[in-house]
Amino acid sequence: MLQGVGLYVGAVLGTGLLVLPSLAAKAAGPAALVAFFVLVVVSAPVAATFGALAGRHPDAGGPATFARRAFGRRASAVAGWWFYFGALAGMPAASAFGAAYVTDLVGGGRTTTVVVAVALVLVAVGVNAVGVELSGRVQLVLTAFLAVLLVGAVVLSAPHAQPEHLRPFAPHGVGGVATAVSLLVWSFTGWETVTHLAPDFRRPRRDLPLATGISIVVIGVLYLAVGGMTILVLGPAAGSAQAPLAELLGRSLGTSVRVIAAVVAVVVTLGVLNVFVASMSKLGAALGRDGALPSWLAKGSNAGEVPRRSLLVVTAGIAVSFVVTALTGFRLEPALRAENACLAGIYLVAMLAGLRLLPARRRQWWVALAAVVLVLAVFVLAGWYLVFPAMVAAGALAYLKFSARRAAAAGV
């Protein structure tokens, strides 16, 4: 259960806190705090539903398995592809968030950020090639370290808070808050990642919901505290800060703290990459097992197995994603919002599956219903970025049709 808390907190609380408070402040000003609060409220029923579903249906497919049980093979393939290929699109952004802290310390601009980001991904891939058990133990240590750092940053920067930085509160209006919410969705994703590792838990039906509940409280408090301090301490500079956490620590204890912040950012980013790479690898094996991807990937989908074939494909996919991001000027926001649109789709399908799979009219069912309404609102905020998950869904359905025809031609 404790490793579960480490995985959840590391996945959800990790890289989002490194840069996104700054992006949200740029989009909405002090009203970014409203966006943080909205997403804390949204994430609670969503996280609880994921925990309940994973506890009842532990499988490496995660949301894809929930979709298959509730709606059939096509919905499962679409949900699986959304995570598999959506997360691949966002990996450069995830790794660059931590790499930005290193660049802030040593200089070198975009080149340093790209090199460090690639190195972090390679380390995460290497750790996952060993196995999930080691990953869980390391994650627990990393998460405890992160929590101590964030609490320290909030406490030490509190004396520098200035209430006048809250005025004007919403300089960009409701539209700015909506943009901040769509950006901050990244900060509250990760609840789905641990569901792919559910079979590896000793007692998933008990441990996953309990780990989820503890994680919701920890994550909500820390996000609101750090987001609030970013606005109150940095003021208008919050929107332009490359590494706001380092800025908070630097103003409290001096610029030497940037060294500590850079080291911690690297460790935290490794923790997030570790969870996502593990989840994508397990999911790829499950999709290969279920026919939504080539059957060659199926090896490693069972509990305790290492999906090395899927891990190899994930690594190649991340490399392609880095190349595309580099060719487009290493602009992270479009890739981030495209991935967020995919994740919003996954969340919506999973919450709808909860209404079919959880006991009707019981507490967990009502929580899932609330989650459906909340996630639907976030889904709409994705706007035209919904084109990306629509294209991925079309690819998933086309693959199913192609594989069915090939199986029929082979007489299977």
Image (tube, rainbow, N blue to C red):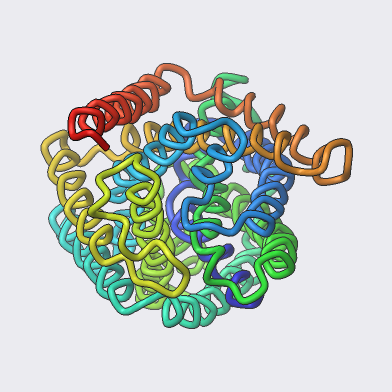
Quarter of the image holding residue 125? bottom left
Residue 307: x and y in percent read 32, 65
- Is residue 346 shown to the viewer in this render? yes
Residue in the picture at 67% in, 44% down: 46
Q: What residue is drawn where x is 43% and y is 76%?
A: 135
- Residue in the foreground of this view, choosing between 138 and 398: 398
Q: Nearer the viewer, residue 354 or 232?
A: 354
> Residue 370 placed where, x, y %?
77, 34
Q: Relative to residue 145, is residue 402 drawn left or right?
A: left
Residue 30 appears in the rendering: no
Residue, x 47% and y 51% (percent of image)?
61
Q: Quadrant of the N terminus?
A: bottom right
| Vertical order, 311 against 292 (above or below) | below
Residue 268 rendering spot, x and y as whole percentages: 43, 68
User: Which residue of the protein is positioned furthest toward the front in this rendering?
Assistant: 411
The quarter in which the C terminus is drawn is top left
Measured as percent of width and height from the top left, residue 160 is found at 62, 61
Height in image: 158 above or below 405? below
Going 54% across and 74% down the picture, which residue do you hit?
143
- The quadrant holding residue 351 is top right
Left or right of residue 156: residue 412: left
Q: How many marks?
A: 0
